[in-house]
Image (cartoon, helix red, strand yellow):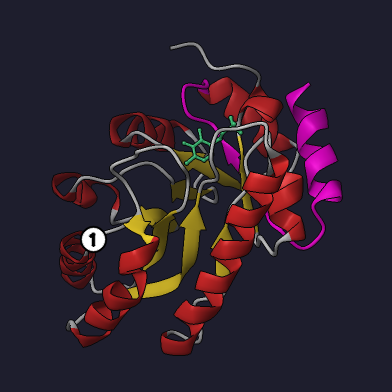
Amino acid sequence: MIAEKIKYYQSELADAKLIAVSKKKSVEDILEAYEAGQRDFGENYIQELVEKKEQLPDDIRWHFIGHLQRNKVKYISEFIHLIHAVDSIRLIKEINKQALKQDKMIDVLLQLHLAQENSKFGIPVNDFESFIGELKKAQISNVRIKGLMTMASNTDDTDQIKSEFEKAKKFSILLQTLYPDAKELSMGMSGDYKLAIEQGSTMVRIGSSIFGKREY
Ligand SMILES: *Cc1c(COP(=O)(O)O)cnc(C)c1O
């Protein structure tokens, strides 16, 4: 089942990259996806990620897609491929500090808050321009801003979702005026990835429709 889903998405997505979201799923499930050729996996919880990483092949590219607390950066800085949901200068400074310690660069995406839900996370659209202005002035030597990440509202209203993804694309273009290499646009999940791709997503984060429903 998992292998078939991976093959389906890998052919269906064309240019966008598939991040298989494996939170709450077993090492065995991840290996099944791996054996079908999947190398990019997304996780939301630090401890779970670190435990799984130790048991799985070294050529997996791990994406941290959850909310990252500053005091946890040190547990993943050595191996993380991309941190998707960065939304504060203080967090970027901590990531920079850990990257400097290891004499490496760490790639991140800025999380834009677009959805109607009152989430605490993500940079509000109204603050985005001043945020990137401030970031540009900060002395960040070892963190690379690779693009934007966002989540659409949890709704059946496809017009609403589409307009949020359209907005994200506009902010992605704005970001590239200051950071020309920040071309990645991480948006789209199991329920809305088609709309995301139509609006220019470069990475989709798909969990439940590959691995099945999560048990909490
Ligand atoms: C869990 C999660 C996903 C995957 O969601 P599905 O609906 O299971 O595809 C994608 N992005 C983030 C940030 C998540 O937390």
Which image quarter holds the C terminus? Answer: top left
Residue at x 55%, y 63% (from the top left corner): 168
| Residue pointed to by mark 1 | 88
Mark 1 vs ligand 1: CB below 8 Å: no
Q: Does the magenta-highlighted stretch encompass residue 13?
A: yes
Q: What element carries label 1?
A: loop
The answer to whether residue 200 is above or below residue 122 is below
Residue at x 35%, y 65% (from the top left corner): 126
Q: Nearer the viewer, residue 113 or 103?
A: 113
Residue at x 52%, y 24% (from the top left corner): 27
The answer to whether residue 152 is above or below residue 203 is above
Would residue 142 be seen by someone viewing this image from the given angle?
Answer: no
Name the residue type under label 1. Answer: Ser
Answer left or right for 139 relative to 30: left
Q: Does the magenta-highlighted stretch encompass residue 208?
A: no
Q: Which of 7 and 123 is in front in this view?
A: 123
Answer left or right for 203 relative to 44: right
Which image quarter holds the N terminus? Answer: top right
Answer left or right for 206 relative to 98: right
Q: Which of 198 and 40 is in front in this view?
A: 198
Please give the range of residues in magenta: 1-26
Q: How many labels does the image show?
A: 1
Q: How crowded is mark 1: few (under 14 residues within 10 Å), some or many (20 or more)?
A: some
Determine the image quadrant of residue 80: bottom left
The answer to whether residue 24 is above or below residue 96 is above
Would residue 132 be seen by someone viewing this image from the given angle?
Answer: yes
- Position of residue 50 measured from the top left corner of the image (x, y, whole percent): 33, 36
Answer left or right for 92 relative to 149: left
- Position of residue 183 measured from the top left corner of the image (x, y, whole percent): 56, 75
